[in-house]
Amino acid sequence: MKHSTALPYPPRFVRQHGGVLTRLLTLLVMLAALAAAVGWWWVSQPLALNAPTVEFSVEAGSSPRAVARGWSEAGVQTSPELLYQWFRWSGQSRQIRAGSYEIQQGASARDLLRMMVQGDESLARVKLIEGWTFQRWREELAKAEGLQSTTRDWTPQQIMAELGQPGVPAEGRFFPDTYAYAKGNTDLAVMRRAQHAMQKHLDAAWAQRNTPTPLKNADEALILASIVEKETGQDADRPLIAGVFANRLRIGMPLQTDPTVIYGLGERFDGNLRRSDLRTDTPFNTYTRRGLPPSPIAMPGKAALMAAVRPAQTKALYFVARGDGSSAFSATLDEHNRAVNQYQRTPRKNP
């Protein structure tokens, strides 16, 4: 007896339901494409912010979901879940870098992710001005925006030890410049950069020194440069002022420079330098002691460093301020006294 093999479904049934499945799959593909288009449109649109600028710091080890939530809490007015799904969908969620970031009005979700993946941090800046003391710069660092003051309670000796120069005075060891840093960075990190910059510029200047020179080493050049920096009113006078001090060092004549006396007085200086101050002996009083003081008295810039190692060839042993920022130079004491009478002791007539 023959048995017939029956189809599980009639051909007409298969054709009908196969058409439904095809249409369903087509619909799903179209919906997926539409969702992708909508998603791509969304990540390209400006994000709504609750302020003109929104800042957020991504901590090391933060998960993509935590980053998305952090931006939402910081002021990005969108669903943190949407942001998180965008991070995941992009395939770059694990490439987000730690750092301090900021976005402004008009930035999109795509811009936001690109910024974090590239590590394009928002930077603040702090200045170190030529002629500032180390204490003055520490005050500036302490109030710098977004800079962690980790050394607030440290002594200068502790700072220099941490920077790898134990026993070296902090004064003069940091190069005057503008330093950019990521918000959340530390004052010690900025100090380290300024220290390296000063050592680089000092080494370069010392390599270009005139010979012979009364200076024994680069540290003495740094000390002299700090004095030149404090004594200079006009840039053009730096080499001549350095020349005067170099001449005095050669013949063993006291430098007799007021800024060193003021530095030695410290907090006792009230803005008025008296004759009694010039006679009060301190390690920095170049009226009572010959030679260079024991350390720099300020932070010299590149021009002062170069003047210290390449002073002008001059016979001058004296100089006095003219009152307009420039100085008058003299080779003899008589000439100097006449210049002092002319520029500092003669009352000026009203125009």
Image (cartoon, rainbow, N blue to C red):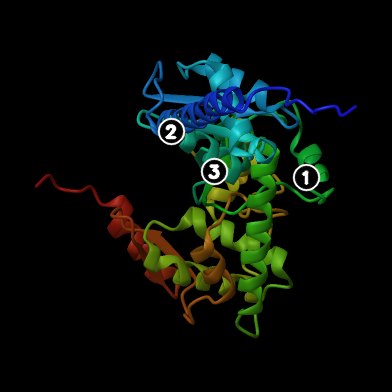
Q: Secondary structure at mark 2?
A: helix
State the residue in front, 118 or 238: 118
State the residue in front, 183 or 325: 183
Q: Looking at this rendering, what residue extends furthest in the front direction?
A: 1
Q: Quadrant of the N terminus?
A: top right
Q: Which image quadrant for residue 282?
A: top right
C-alpha distance separating marks 1 and 2: 58 Å
Residue at point 66% right, 44% down? 191
Tally of numbered discs: 3
Marking on residue 248: none
Q: Give the side of residue 238 with respect to residue 327, left or right.
A: right
Of mark 3 and mark 1, the one earlier in the sequence is 3
Residue 349 screen position, x and y as percent: 14, 47
- Residue labelled with disc 1: 160
Q: Looking at this rendering, what residue extends furthest in the right direction?
A: 1
Query: Can you see residue 111?
Result: yes
Q: Amino acid at mark 1?
A: Met
Residue at point 43% right, 33% down? 37
49 lies above or below 124? above
- Residue labelled with disc 2: 37
User: Of discs 3 and 2, which sits in the foreground?
Assistant: 2
Of mark 3 and mark 2, the one earlier in the sequence is 2
Q: Secondary structure at mark 1?
A: helix
Query: Can you see residue 280?
Result: no
Q: Amino acid at mark 2?
A: Ala
User: Of discs 3 and 1, which sits in the foreground?
Assistant: 3
- Residue labelled with disc 3: 120
How dense is the environment of label 1, judged by Cα within 10 Å: few (below 14), some, or many (20 and up)? many
- Residues tagged 3 and 1 counted as in contact (Cβ below 8 A): no
